[in-house]
Each structure stands twice: as structure tokens, then as C-alpha cells.
Image: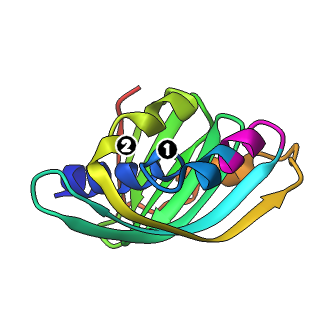
Amino acid sequence: MLKHKWITLLLVLLLPFAAAAQSQLAEIAAHLQSERVSLHYDCTYTEDTPVKLSGDLVVQGDCYCAKGNGMEIYSDGTTRWTVDPASKEVYIEPADGLAELVAYRDALSELKITGLKYLPLLDDLSAFRFDTASLDASWVVTDLR
């Protein structure tokens, strides 16, 4: 179950590269390395059974954080933490930075981006990491690195 949720939420991270308005995507792409980009998204993942996705995404450089559909994904560019708070499960895996965000771009439709903000870069990247040390024994942490 977590694997299916993980795949669904990972698809959310593909939003900046989905087949939406090219001018808006070009604008977002132009800001990715020089500013922190924050946005809210709504879209449909159309491969196999269509799934509606909605949430918030923050990107800075190769780091990103996505929260939506009951899941959270944190990536500092080299490590990805996929968190299911309801199931109390965390998967830790190697990450490929922003390169992993484009894998399913053709499977997204009806993309709507709202609340788009360009913010100054921050030196503190802790928002893109998940601290498993603070979890109690009821959590399942699977480290696949």
C-alpha cells in the first residue's frame, strides 16, 4: 500500500515539468536555480486508473518538499524520505535531485498551478530533510540507501 502511495505522491513532484501552459513552465524553470519556488498544484495522474492529486510543492536547487494526498516527500538532492504519517512509515532512498521529477511528466493532465511564489534562496536546507531520530518506536523506517 505504501509503495502505491509513494508512487502517486512522487508523481506530484513532476508538476513543474508536466504538459501544462508552456509559458508558465518556462517561467518556473527559469527561477529554479536562483530562487526558492513555492506552489500549490491540482492535477490528474492518467496512467492506468486516473488519480486526482493536490498539494503543495517547494523547490530550491536540487532540493524539494511535496505534501499532498496524505503523503510527504522530502529530498535534499541526494536522499529522499517518503513519509506516510497515517501509517507511520518512512522510506529512505537515494535521490537524483530534480532529474527524478521528470520521469512521469507525460502521465499528468489537467495541471493547475496556483499560489506560485518566488522566494529568496535560504542557506538552511533543513526543510528538505526528514529527521527520523525524533520518531517513536511505533514508526517503521525502511532505509534503502
Q: Position of residue 92 (x, y in %)?
A: 42, 39
Q: Position of residue 107 (x, y in %)?
A: 27, 48
Amino acid type for the residue under numbered disc 2: Arg
The circle on residue 83 is none
Q: Are marks 2 and 1 in contact (CB under 8 Å)?
A: yes
Of labels 2 and 1, earlier in sequence is: 1
Whether 31 is among the magenta residues is yes
Instruction: Name the residue: 82% across, 47% down.
Output: 35
Which label was assigned to residue 105?
2
Q: Position of residue 22 (x, y in %)?
A: 55, 49
Magenta residues span: 27-34
Identity of the amino acid at label 1?
A: Phe
- Using the image as rendered, state which of residue 44 and residue 20 is in the foreground: 20
Q: Main secondary structure of the magenta part?
A: helix
Which residue is rendered at x = 72% and y = 54% of the image? 37
Residue 61 sits in quarter: top right
* Number of the label disc, if any, that sits on residue 17: 1
Residue located 73% across and 49% down the image: 126
